[in-house]
Image (spheres, rainbow, N blue to C red):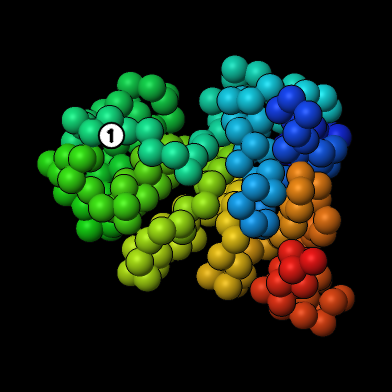
Amino acid sequence: MKYLQTENLTKKFGSTVAVDGVNVVLEKGKIYGLLGPNGSGKSTFMKMVAGLFHPTSGNMMVQGNKLSILSKGEIAFMPTEAYFYNYMKVRTVGEFHEDFYEDFDTAKYEELIKDMNLDMNMKVSALSSGMAAKLKLAATMARDAKLFMLDEPLNGIDLIARDQIMSAIIKKASEDNIMLLSSHLIDVLENILDEVIFIKEGKIVLSGDAEEIREEKGKSIVDLYKEVFAS
């Protein structure tokens, strides 16, 4: 079922074009990979969908209607930036999200925190980068959103934390939601992706069903990524 559709979505910062005429359709029940190196436009695209950046031009529709306060409430976005205050405890982060988001499930948050081997009494200031990444994910995935957008969820974390995050993503994915994962770590993500979107210098250069693309090109998504972004 079509949930999100963009038409010629463009974002400029002065003379710099960060996202250039992007056309995508996201359907429920699928895991999408928004793939490209740093600076390719992944974060800017996600921030427009989340309503944090206003497009310079183009259209964005959620279930056939323009992005609104209501539809923004159905979208859970996890940015790359840390956004918790150092004085907070893990428990406080959950309380903050509970106050802010109507669809936040505190019981689910507590379950995710346990699965991530975190402690409710830990202070944000004492967390390692891997722990902070897991905390961000738990806070995002505890929501009952229709579209989950995770911007570089695997950046800067060790293999054990990576496995925990991948497990949480797979467990949360369902027929009723969409997972949009931005990353340049294609080897880790390839096996769970239903659809891939390659974005280069703000433009979509390849997109479609991951398995069909592998069959058509005779290459893995990892090898295609190397081919597309090496040039």
Locate residue 205 relative to residue 45 in the image: left or right: right
- Label total for image: 1
* Quadrant position of the N terminus in the picture: top right
Viewer-closest of 84 and 4: 84
Visible residue check, residue 217: yes
Q: Could you say where residue 51 lies in the image, as x and y percent from the top left? A: 61, 25
* Quadrant position of the C terminus in the picture: bottom right
Locate residue 154 relative to residue 92 in the image: left or right: right
- Residue at 65 percent across and 32 percent down: it is 49
Vertical placement of 143 versus 193: above or below?
above
Q: Secondary structure at mark 1?
A: helix
Vertical placement of 42 versus 83: above or below?
below
Viewer-closest of 141 and 161: 161
* Three-letter code, disc 1: Gly
Find residue 143 and report its image quarter.
top left
Find residue 60 and report its image quarter.
top right
Vertical placement of 83 versus 142: above or below?
above
Viewer-closest of 126 and 23: 126
Q: Could you say where residue 192 lies in the image, as x and y percent from the top left? A: 58, 67
- Residue at 28 percent across and 30 percent down: it is 85
Query: Residue farthest to the top?
Result: 69
Visible residue check, residue 145: no
Query: Residue farthest to the front?
Result: 15
Q: Could you say where residue 115 lies in the image, as x and y percent from the top left? A: 28, 58
Badge 1 crowding class, 10 Å Cα cut-off, few under 14, some 14 to 19, many 20 or more, is: many
The residue at which mark 1 appears reads as: 94
Find residue 194 and report its image quarter.
bottom right
Query: Residue farthest to the bottom?
Result: 218
- Residue at 71 percent across and 60 percent down: it is 195
- Residue at 22 percent across and 58 percent down: it is 117
Q: Could you say where residue 180 lies in the image, as x and y percent from the top left? A: 61, 49
